[in-house]
Image (spheres, helix red, strand yellow):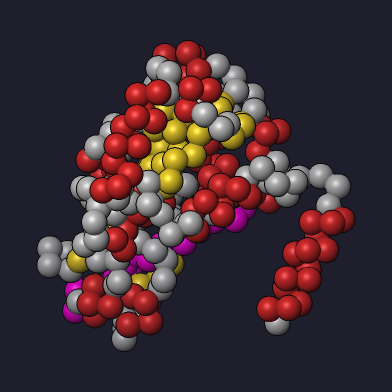
Amino acid sequence: MAKSVSNMMFRNLLTRSKAEDINVINGRRQKIPFATDGCDRCGSCSKVCPADAITTDDGWTMDAGKCISCMECVDACKKNAIEMIDGPDYVLKREDLIFKHGGPKERTGGKLDAEKLKAIGRSIHIREVDTGSCNSCEVEVNSLSNQYYDVERFGIKIVASPRHADVLLITGPLTENMYLALTKVVAATPNPKVIIAMGSCAISGGMFTNGNVIGKGIGDTVNVDIFIPGCPPSPDRLIRALLGAFNLSSGQR
C-alpha cells in the first residue's frame, strides 16, 4: 500500500504540468474534535489527550492551539460523543482557538490591519524561523515552493534573510538555545512586519511544554499577528491562511 501511494505521488510530480487548482486546495480541510450533545463530561477524552488540549472541569473545552489531531479522544469516548469538524485555517487572536461545548464550531479568521497590509504591498516575502521544532512543519513549508503548490503564483515568496522579509513564519516551541536567535531575527526584520506562529508548538509549546522551552508558545516572547494551528499545518491550510489574512483570495489585493 505504502509503495503504491509513493509511486503515485512520484508519478504525479513528474507528469504534473501546472500547480493544483485553488478550488481543490480550498476543499481540503484539517479536522479538530468537538463534543456533541451526547457528551456528559466524563473526562475520558481529556485523560488520553497527549497534548492536554481537552479539559472537562468546567464544561468540555478544547484548545485547537494545542491539538495534534491524533483522534485519541474520539477512540476513548464510549458514547461516541466527539465528532471531527473543520478546524480554522488561522485566527488573529489566541483565544479564538478555544472551542467549548455548546459554542460556535466556526471561527472567522479576519484580515490583518489595513495600514500594515498597505505598507507591505501586493507581494509577501516570508522568512521561516525554526525555534526548536521536530522538523515536520519545515517539511510542509518546503512543500509550498514545489510545482504542486507553487505558492509564488499568489505573490508569496520564501526568502533567505529576515532583512528581505515582510513576514516571519515561526515554527516549533521556543527552546532556551534559540531565544537569542529569535530576538535577533525579529530585530533584523524591517517594520512593519507580520509574525506568524505556525503549528501547535509555536502557538502553545505543544508536546514540549515540559522541556527546556521558554514560555508556552512564542506569544510569550514576541507579538504574534497570526496563529495557524495544526501538527503540522498542511500546505493547503498555510496557503488558505496567507491568502485570507493578507486578502489575496485570487492572488491579488
Q: Nearer the viewer, residue 57 or 233?
A: 233
Q: Nearer the viewer, residue 23 or 242?
A: 242
Residue 37 picture location, percent across and down: 29, 70
Establish if 2 lies above or below 250.
below
At a point 68% along the width and 51% down the height, the residue shown is: 24
Q: Is residue 153 visible?
A: yes
Q: Is residue 46 left or right of residue 124?
A: left
Q: Nearer the viewer, residue 181 or 199?
A: 181
Q: Quadrant of the C terminus?
A: top right
Q: Which SS does the magenta portion mostly show?
A: loop
Point out the residue furthest to the bottom here.
78
At a point 39% along the width and 30% down the height, the residue shown is: 185
Residue 51 picture location, percent across and down: 29, 66
Quick check: is 133 in the magenta stretch? no
Quick check: is 39 in the magenta stretch? yes
Q: Is residue 153 left or right of residue 170?
A: right
Q: Quadrant of the N terminus?
A: bottom right
* Magenta part of the chain: 27-42
Establish if 250 lies above or below 144.
above
Residue 150 picture location, percent across and down: 70, 41
Establish if 183 lies above or below 122.
below
At a point 30% along the width and 47% down the height, the residue shown is: 177
At a point 73% along the width and 78% down the height, the residue shown is: 3
Q: Is residue 112 visible?
A: no
Establish if 235 lies above or below 12.
above
Point out the residue furthest to the left here.
57
Residue 46 picture location, percent across and down: 24, 73
